[in-house]
Image: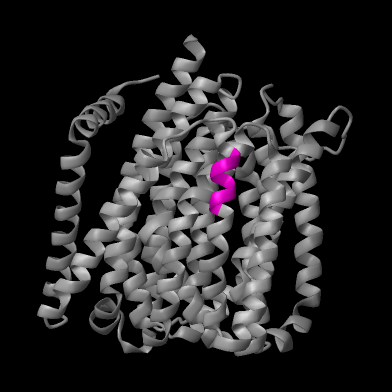
Amino acid sequence: MKSINSVSAKTMQGASLMILRTLVLYPIGFLAEVCLSRFLQPQDFGIYAMASFVTVILAGVLEVGLTASLTQRIKKPSQFEFQILFSLQLLVISLLVFALFLLGPNFFDWLKLDSSVRWIMLVLLLCPWISGIGAMSHVQLERELRYSVFAKIDILRGFSYCTIAVLLAFYGWGVWSFVVAIIISTIVRTAVAFHNAPWTVRFRLNFSGMEKTLRSGLLFQASTITSLFRDHIGVILAGPLFGPQAVGYLNWAKNMTFYSSQVFTQVVSRVTFPSISRIQKSPTAVQEMVQATLKYINIITFPIIFIFAALIPEFVAVIFTSKWTPAIPVFYFYSIRMLGSNITTVHISVLNGLGHIRTSLRILVWWTFLDWIFAGVFCFWFGFHGVAIAYAISVIPISIWLLFEVNKWAKISFYQTLYIPFLVSGSVGFLVWILKTWFEPSWLSIGVLGLLGMFTYITLLFLIEGHSLLKEIQIFLRTLSNKY
């Protein structure tokens, strides 16, 4: 019981720290996106998305699977295992990125890219090797639930990326603004992780006794691959069909909706997975953690999604400039995706933390299948907008499936976690949409309407759940000053 209480306390503190970390990074990241949107062209966003897909993203798949298998299991890994998995990761990533670089020219005609992108790919190949050194440090940090370190890593990485990208874009570096920024921020992330959780780096290939860990890693790997081909349909399908500019619109809308939701959801999920892994033998503790996690993710993100969606035409006209107008419909459909992703991101982490990796993999495979089928059909009818329409539709049945699947292991109240945040947020979003017709679009009117919407939302929420919210806010503040 003491161990479970300790994990719960660390999880609460970790979630609190990660939320505060997000509140620090949120304005920095959003301001950076505004600057990049003004300084760069849609094609720059598209070229970077395509180049990074066939290098950094694809090569990074291996890291996720192997590190997740070490994090989820109950037994603490040894230095020997760290060295073996690091060596395997380094070897496979090296072979993979080398093959991708050699085959790179074959991708250019398919993705409608100029051959000069070869140099962008070459530089981006540095990222997987750099991050590989820090991967085993991340395992140690996650297993020890050292969320304060993760908050530090994310703040330093986010600040370095945003600062460098914006400065280079301002001085006319174009797509290279993204490239240089991601390289330097990867170095920062790896250095801070290794400093806080050092391990003996050594190349060693001896798989004796590692069969179970490797099998588990392959399942995590398969889940990651489905996510890769599901989340990047804009690159894989829209790129060849409609070109880099269309991909740029899709990538921009994805980034904007990310800042309205997943920027919070993903950091809390990072806390959920290792914490659930530590308490997986206690159904009551799992239930309480899942209930609290989903409730507060939705309470925080739903109003941002609805208010941002209500004001996005004004945001584009005044802040991002009219060159992004074709992406507004895409933004709406991505916003629907983000509402569902609050459920899917958390619940996949819960299933993986409980060890039900095959179940989550089966759901992810079906989700990928639905995305691709819908995207193929809707792109034929609606052009590149079809990708976003597919995302909006497919997330609905998958969210319902995951809710019922996790409910087998952790009974949660849909009224508290979903219905109240959704209805109150939707009402506030509709109110903002009505009120904006009384104002001329400007920085001032957008700010006033946004603040009014959030104030109204908070007021309504406290009228409905004021007593419990005040009590939980006190717990939230108290955990920040405790040490576990």
Q: Which residue is drawn at 44% across and 42% down?
A: 268
- Reply yes or no: does residue 401 show up in magenta: yes
Q: Which of the pair 454/7 is nearer the observer?
A: 454
269 or 170: nearer the eye?
A: 269
Whether residue 119 appears in magenta in the rendering, the answer is no
Task: Name the spot of residue 228 as percent of width and height, x first.
Answer: 65, 61
Q: Nearer the viewer, residue 453 or 279?
A: 453
Q: In this view, does 197 lie above or below 253?
A: above
Looking at the image, residue 377 lies above or below residue 79: below
In the displayed image of the protein, which residue is found farthest to the top? 2
Residue 163 seen from this side: yes
Horizontal relation, residue 323 to residue 270: left or right: left
Q: Where is residue 318 in the image (x, y as percent from the top left)?
A: 23, 82
Q: Give the range drawn in magenta.
A: 399-405
Q: Which residue lies at the image location 38% right of the left edge and 29% below the top edge?
A: 12
In this picture, residue 403 sits left or right of residue 110: left
From the image, which quarter does the C terminus lie in?
top left
**Residue 310 figure quarter:** bottom left
Residue 430 at x, y percent in the picture: 24, 66
Q: Which of 169 and 416 is in front in this view?
A: 416
| Residue 408 position within the rendered picture, expressed as x and y whole percent measured from the top left | 59, 33
181 lies above or below 199 = below
- Position above or below: 62 against 108: above
User: What secondary structure is the stretch in magenta mostly built from?
Assistant: helix
Numbered-mark total: 0
Image-quadrant location for residue 462: top left
Which colour assignment does the render follow? Answer: one colour
Q: Which residue is drawn at 52% across and 82% down?
A: 385
Tell me if residue 148 can be seen: no
Horizontal side, residue 362 vs residue 143: left or right: right
